[in-house]
Image (cartoon, rainbow, N blue to C red):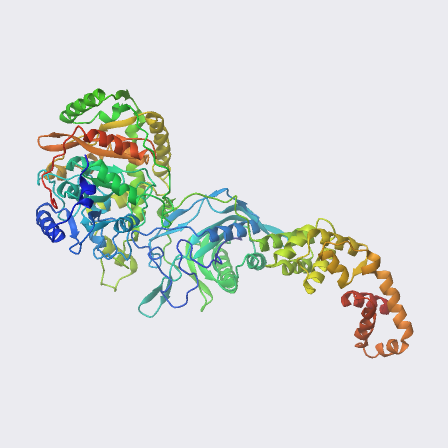
Amino acid sequence: MIGGIEEFVDKEKPEGYYERLIAELEKVNSKLHIFSSINRQISSGIPFSVKDNICVSGVESTASSAVLEGYVPPFDATPVERLKSNGFGFVGKTKMDEFGFGTFGINCKDHPRNPFGDSYVTGGSSAGAAAAVSVMKYHIAVAESTGGSISCPAAFCGVVGFTPTYGLVSRYGLIDYANSLDKIGIIGRSSRDVRYAFDIIKGSDSYDTTCVDHQINGENRKKLIIIDQLMANVDQDILSSFDKFISKMQNLGYSVEHRSLPLIDKALAAYYIISMAEASTNLAKYTGFKYGIRVNDFSKGYNEFFTEARRNFGPEAKRRIILGTFVRSASVKSRYYEKAMRFRHMLIDALNSIIKDGFLISPTMPIKAPAIKEAEELSPLKSYSMDSITVPPNLAGLPHVSFPYDYINGFPVGVQLVTSHFNDYALLDFVQGWEEEFNYRFNYDVGAI
Amino acid sequence: MKIGLEVHVALPTKSKLFCSCSSGAEEPNTAICPTCLGFPGSRPMLNEEALKRSVTIAKAVHCKVNEKTHFIRKVYFYPDLPKSYQITQLEGAIGHCGYVDIERKRIRIRRVQIEEDPARIIHADDYSLLDFNRSGVALNEIVTEPDIESEAELREFMSELRSILFYAGVDIDKEMKVDLNISVGAEKVEIKNITGIKNLVDAERFEEKRQEELIASNKRVATETRSYSEETMSTVPSREKETDEEYGFIYEPDLAVYPTNGIIPYATVIASELAKQYSGKRKETIKTIKELVMFDREALKLIQYGAGQSNIETVINAIEVLKRRGKIRMPEKGFGKMLDLLDKGIVLDDDAIAALNDGEDVEAEKHGVSTEEIDREILNVLSQRPDLVKEYKTNKKVFNSIVGIVIKKYKVSPKHVAERLALVLGE
């Protein structure tokens, strides 16, 4: 299937194309609240959107947080800079759960709505990014995943969400959630679109120590591995549709192996401990001083001044600051933070040995996109537990992709494929193979020519 | 009494620790960038020169250098700290378990580490100003064990440390901040951010007396953080200090683990170390060696080479001669021969040194002159010029005239002739 942005590059654009694109986008946005800002100046290039926690020079970048209101970074994030100078045009910033803290995309003001039904969530935290892809015909979204923030909304919005191996894409310009887990990735309408953009943004950067140049492989493996523990809490309708998908893959020549990995049940806890510990230090800098929200009352001491600014965090951000500060406190650190750090290494070893000759496969999410009301009523712990499938590859820094494989009651469901470090291309090859069998459905085609 | 110190000095690097901003800008807030302002989206990149400088200091205070070094975040809220955490070190510090010897004891060094400096706060009457030029400047912290037990030892330690750091390119008289931990009894008091050696000693003296008086009058010394005021020369309780519990150290996830095994410390520090090694306890020799090799790799090379062959006094004399004559780039082999000749009591003339420098053999009979020969010539001159001997008794300046006559014949060092002449005249 050649189409997508490669087709866009070759096509003659009718006059006034970009003006019409922006007008249509603004109309859709007033209904679905996908973008925090739309770039009316776009006049050329393949449209790309940027998750609001990734800096675009001269454009307000707030990670959808009131604390950062008014922060206009003086520099482009490296992936943004690379896309801009390789034929892409910046189309807008997409909404997200504040700082990436959320599974449904509802932890922000005027949160995005699912293009398949506007009373349903988009998934999070790259909520607007996945929804924008689902809405726009020619476009890729620069998104970011810490514990599943690309896979989850990609699954709920019926698009391809690709999270590369940790360290392949520079994080310079990313407003940090948890640095040792944060990965910038691409969401697109097809594996080809994703690959096109990924090839531009990847590679070392003199502004990010953790970013490397590494040979990226595409080693196809004909075995699919299902870890039983990951299937334990998956909804029945998803399970039966997933079984059908697996049968299809067997017909296509894949073997299937079931494995038990009891320690994977601890991944969620370890992930939340590490991510909250790091987040609580990253969020310490928001004190209303040099950027973001301004406190104008200088009559009090600095502690009161800082507190005034920090009142503007949303409830989930406050919860994570408090929990994150607790788990790294000296007296309990060895029971939480350090233990979780050790567990991460155990998990990496365990997963590496399981997937060395196959792909790890599962539904991306244990549920379909829930109604907004339903999601709002979930307790924090219940919400966190929705990440049980997306967290393990994220905690281990393994590349993974979520792509739609079926539609249940008109809503897309996604499958998540995981492979070894630096075998990223194998994931995109796999999806490309699947695309020969599969017809994507979209409710919008903004920007179609 | 027990005293432990945390000494902070700026590392002599052109740029800051985690960005390429200049370390020494004067006009406030001109050397700044997203990284040293802690802007969202920015991240640190380690200045490798700082690593090398700190390894140099760690080795100079006899630390074990960690094979791999890494950084941590120390979280606290203060207006001068742009990220509300400081990137510093703890277990994975540059060096640990070192020492500095002072006159009669050894002060153990717990740790040598790198960290970033916060911004500078300038307090005015009812407002404060922040200068972020200093934010992110590379600092080196030296943490001692509580081994210092008196004001005299404190002075001695600081004097020794000043000298060690000077040869590592750091001048503590320009800028140094010390946290002083002092306990006369059981309770520890920390006095933070003392600037300069004079204030450190004054603060120690005041605090020692204050604690002694409290103990003498059966009052409790509070475990607390205090600050020192230069104006009143006294210490006062300061804001509540965060505890380790609240700092909540975590690994700095934006930086790597850095190997140190490929890092060669700066030669000057090796020299400073060699000086002590080769010269025993004679302070003037230590000073001479340090001065000779300070920032001079060639002299350092020759000292290292020569010290294995001849006694250190001879080596120093030879290097001084070579430096004076601009021949310090002497090949090791030639230098070895030179030391041989010197050890035999032969004084070398310019031609001999030039020949050694060119890698040629030098026959002592041709180019050198033995001490006996010089003594003979001195006696010869003195017997021929009794007028000079007579005049010398009233006018000591004649001494140099006699030296001048002797070296007309032999092109040897006037210093050497002067030494011999002094001996002869003394007899």
Q: How many marks?
A: 0
B204 relative to A60 in the view: left or right: right
Q: Is residue A162 visible?
A: yes
Q: Can residue B107 be seen?
A: no
Residue B404 in the image, given as x and y percentages of width and height: 80, 72
* Front-most of residues B74 and B192: B74
A101 vs B74, left or right, is left
Which residue is nearer to you in this view: B101 or A29? A29
- Position of residue B119 in the picture relative to residue A319 (left or right): right
Horizontal and vertical percent position of residue A85: 27, 51
Q: Is residue B164 left or right of residue A383?
A: right
Q: Position of residue A415 (x, y in %)?
A: 20, 30
Quadrant in the rendering for residue A371: top left
Q: Quadrant of the C terminus of chain A?
A: top left
Q: Is residue A398 above or below residue A300?
A: above
Looking at the picture, how far across and down is residue B192, in whole percent? 44, 58
